[in-house]
Image (tube, rainbow, N blue to C red):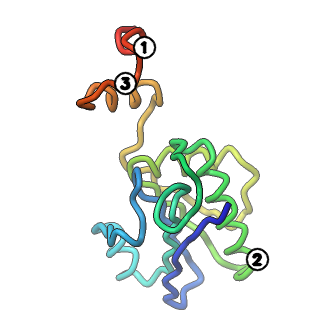
Amino acid sequence: MDVYAYYVDRGSDKTVMIHGGFRGNWNNGIVTEEYNDFYKAGYNLLFVDSRATGNSGGDYVTYGQYESDDVLYWINQEVRERPSQKILLYGGSMGAPTMMSVLAKDIPVNVKGIIENCGFASIDEQLRFTYSQTVVPALPDAIKNQ
């Protein structure tokens, strides 16, 4: 499966790797004040298109389960191309638990920090909330009423 990311080179030795929320991607033009702040501060930016999002392949979003592997791929790619690069992980909304899941993996020492913005504590609670907001039931009532 192909995964895509978009690099904004500011000539810095620091890169902020950005993973946005559900279906958020570079192609949608989703730019927040945080991204602008990183840009104005002179950091390189690497926007990761999550699987099944933007130009990346895949049929399903897995709420961080496999997206964290994709982020690890881009971390390792950045370190291969720029061995002295310092990396900050930034995850917003669904990107937050994805980035937190990356920390459980064997990551290079180049990763110096993480910003977890608006994540969720429980995938179960998140899915129940999402289900409660749908117009057409997608799950059996037995799951909804537990």
Q: Residue 140 at x, y = what percent?
A: 41, 15
Q: Is residue 141 positioned above or below 22 on the image?
A: above
Q: Quadrant of the N terminus?
A: bottom right
Number of marks: 3
- 3D distance between C-alphas at marks 2 and 3: 40 Å
Residue at (36% x, 46% y) in the render: 118
Residue bearing mark 2: 80
- For residue 99, the mark is none
Secondary structure state at the residue bearing disc 3: helix
Q: Quadrant of the C terminus?
A: top left
Considering only order in the chain, which callout, 1 or 2, is on the residue closer to the N terminus?
2
Q: Amino acid at mark 1?
A: Ile
Horizontal arrangement in the rendering, residue 113 relative to residue 26 (left or right): right
**Which dot, 2 or 3, sits closer to the camera?**
3
- 3D distance between C-alphas at marks 2 and 1: 45 Å
Q: Residue 100 at x, y = what percent?
A: 56, 46
- 3D distance between C-alphas at marks 1 and 3: 9 Å
Q: Amino acid at mark 3?
A: Arg
Residue bearing mark 3: 128
Horizontal arrangement in the rendering, residue 114 relative to residue 109 (left or right): left
Number of other residues with Cα within 10 Å of mark 2, as a class: few under 14, some 14 to 19, many 20 or more: few
Q: Is residue 107 positioned above or below 46 on the image?
A: above
Q: Which residue is more in the foreground, 132 or 32?
A: 132
- For residue 143, the mark is 1
Q: Amino acid at mark 2?
A: Arg
Q: Which residue is more in the foreground, 94 or 100?
A: 94
**Which picture quadrant has residue 120?**
top left
* Image marks 2 and 1: residues in contact by CB distance under 8 Å: no
* Image marks 2 and 3: residues in contact by CB distance under 8 Å: no
Number of other residues with Cα within 10 Å of mark 1, as a class: few under 14, some 14 to 19, many 20 or more: few
Horizontal arrangement in the rendering, residue 13 relative to residue 30 (left or right): right
**Which picture quadrant has residue 137?**
top left
